[in-house]
Image (cartoon, rainbow, N blue to C red):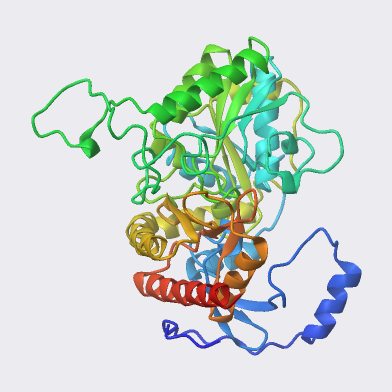
Amino acid sequence: VSTQAKMPTCNFVAEKYKSYPYEHMQKIREQNISPSLRMYYKKPLLLHQGHMQWLFDYEGRRYLDLFAGIVTVSVGHCHPKVTVAAQKQLARLWHTTNIYMHPSIHEYAEKLTSFLPDPLKVVYLTNSGSEANDLAMFMARLYTRNFDIISLRGAYHGGSPYTLGLTSVGLYKHSVANGFGCSTTMLPDVFRGPWGGSHCRDSPVQTVRKCSCSEGWLFTNTFSNLQLTDCIMCVCHANDQYIEQFKDTLNTSVPKTIAGFIAEPIQGVNGAVQYPRNFLKEAYQLVRERGGICISDEVQTGFGRTGSHFWGFETHGVVPDIVTLAKGIGNGFPMAAVVTTKDIASSLAQNLHFNTFGGSPLACVVGAAVLDAIEEDGLQKNSEEVGTYMLLELAKLRDKFEVVGDVRGKGLMIGVEMVTDKDSRHPLPGEEINQIWEDCKDMGVLIGRGGLYSQTFRIKPPMCINKKDVDFTVEVLNTALQKHMERAAAK
């Protein structure tokens, strides 16, 4: 596939691939690996090495990785600092379990909680995001002595039998009983939902929908030179409507007292969906009035990815009662965490709750090295600067192409939603999206997919990418969209 886009240079030289031939790998995949583990692309990639934002396949082709192992490689593939820390610990002590003390779990617990506000200072380490959310649900129910938990439609909180009740994306649902005690409420999606528009979300790029707030914003104070962007305490019509829907769920679908409410600060699997600015703040208040606790699922939004703040919940001006962490916490190493208050954590200590691998010496050393790399490499600031630059550049493609319905996100958590046209907002048919996606891959850019109809491109790269990578990405996507328009015109 020809393109004018020139891939940025990379001084790293990948090793020569020495494992089985591609065809033999395919055969093993078909015979020995669960078919539920689906693969991307018509001809799935066979990757064998990574370096920072780059991946290399078995033939030596280089790809710009804008999906980061599903939002997991936070500081860069095989980051030198993290790699060296892991190597040193591998030679010292892999595993002992947490029935004994070892230095790294204590050092890491202190370091991790230093990034969180009071009273979120108690850590329980696990191995995956599903496991962390599973435990958060358990803690919420134990602590409150209530059972019902509310989540947002379009949410993804894990694939375990327990968390599937909170996950509200049909693709992940199986035809077995799950979700007892779990209720969903309307997603406050200001692009695809019934309300919302051009002033509602915390993003450098707003939806092109006309905002119902644009002519009726109310200010608590009046200043002669007050601009809309200066408004601190405003009335958002869309937010009010979505909060009314939340109240309706509380009044009809759950008991008078509940265990809690869980939400991602920005929805990940659903395609970087953002809520009106004050939605979580008001929802948290309503939940606490019902005796429930508030859980922030930071599996994708944590560790500086949103740019302006280290945690996604901080962008909403709230402090949750439980925070769940995974993915970027270990830069690809299997680890996760639940962070909560001492009182809530104590509810789990009434009986034994044990995790063999959680908080292993190796995991904790890796986690600490990731935190150091984020700080030393300035990756939160990079996420804000490069992410904002990318959002604004992608918005130009939205203005240029009718099929690009929405560009949204914050920092390096970005969604590009594809539609048949901006008026109807109907999802672009799958076969058309697939071809754009395949063209991007053929030109050297790997991006994810999400949304209820797989209609949204998910761009959540390692946080070390730079503006040259952005320019390359935008050129590649522009070429792919041009090809799409040519195909559509030829029909």
Task: Please tell me which residue is depicted at 47% across the width and 19% down the height of the picture.
Answer: 285
Residue 98: x %, y % from top left: 69, 42
Which quadrant of the figure contains the N terminus? bottom right
Residue 62: x %, y % from top left: 55, 82
Q: Is residue 71 left or right of residue 208?
A: right
Task: Please tell me which residue is depicted at 33% across the width and 25% down the height of the picture.
Answer: 235
Quarter residue 68 falls in: bottom right
Count of marks placed on residues? 0
Above or below — where is 182 with respect to 23? above
Residue 147, can we see it? yes
Which quadrant of the figure contains the C terminus? bottom right
Quarter residue 439 falls in: bottom right
Residue 388: x %, y % from top left: 34, 57
Above or below — where is 257 with respect to 424? above
Q: Name, please, the residue furthest toward the top.
A: 256
Task: Please tell me which residue is depicted at 50% across the width and 68% down the height of the picture.
Answer: 79
Q: Is residue 277 left or right of residue 177?
A: left
Residue 399: x %, y % from top left: 37, 61
Q: Name, please, the residue furthest toward the right.
A: 31
In the image, 256 versus 113, the foreground residue is: 256
In the image, 140 versus 484, the foreground residue is: 484
In the image, 397 versus 87, the foreground residue is: 397
Above or below — where is 394 with respect to 158? below
